[in-house]
Amino acid sequence: MNDHKTYHRCGVCEQRKNNGIFLYQMYLCHECEQEIISVRPDEDHYSYYVGKLRAINQSTYTI
Ligand SMILES: [Zn+2]
């Protein structure tokens, strides 16, 4: 697609990365993507990521 070497700020860890994907409007770096995939619903982490993902969903309605 476009310049995939462009750095974007990851919406989860808030670091600038160039190895991530766009999930709706939020950029998600590879590390966080893997983290989310590996997280299980019974882990404390999970609600943190779910909250982040909910924020993305909500933001799609503001376009
Ligand atoms: Zn990240």
Image: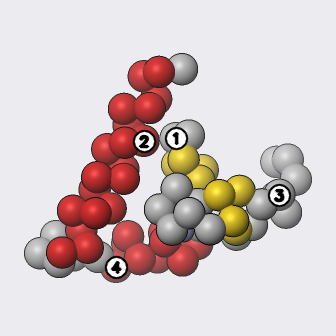
Q: Tell me residue 8's x, y (percent).
A: 71, 56
Task: Tell me the element at label 1.
Answer: loop
- Marks 3 and 4 sit apart, C-alpha to C-alpha, by 26 Å
- Label at residue 34: none
Q: Amino acid type of disc 3?
A: Thr
Left or right? Give the position of 35 relative to 26: left
* Residue at (38, 70) in percent of width and height: 36
Q: Are marks 1 and 2 in contact (CB under 8 Å)?
A: yes
- Marks 2 and 3 sit apart, C-alpha to C-alpha, by 21 Å
- Label 2 sits on residue: 56
Closer mark to the observer between disc 1 and disc 2: 2
Question: Up-down: is 58 above or below 29?
Answer: above
* Residue at (88, 53) in percent of width and height: 3
Left or right? Give the position of 13 relative to 16: left
Q: Tell me residue 43's x, y (percent).
A: 17, 77
- Label 4 sits on residue: 38
- Label 3 sits on residue: 6
Q: Badge 1: few (under 14), some or many (20 or more) residues near its Cα, within 10 Å?
A: few
Q: Badge 3: few (under 14), some or many (20 or more) residues near its Cα, within 10 Å?
A: few
Mark 3 vs mark 4: which is more N-terminal?
3
Question: Up-down: is 8 above or below 63?
Answer: below
Mark 2 vs mark 3: which is more N-terminal?
3
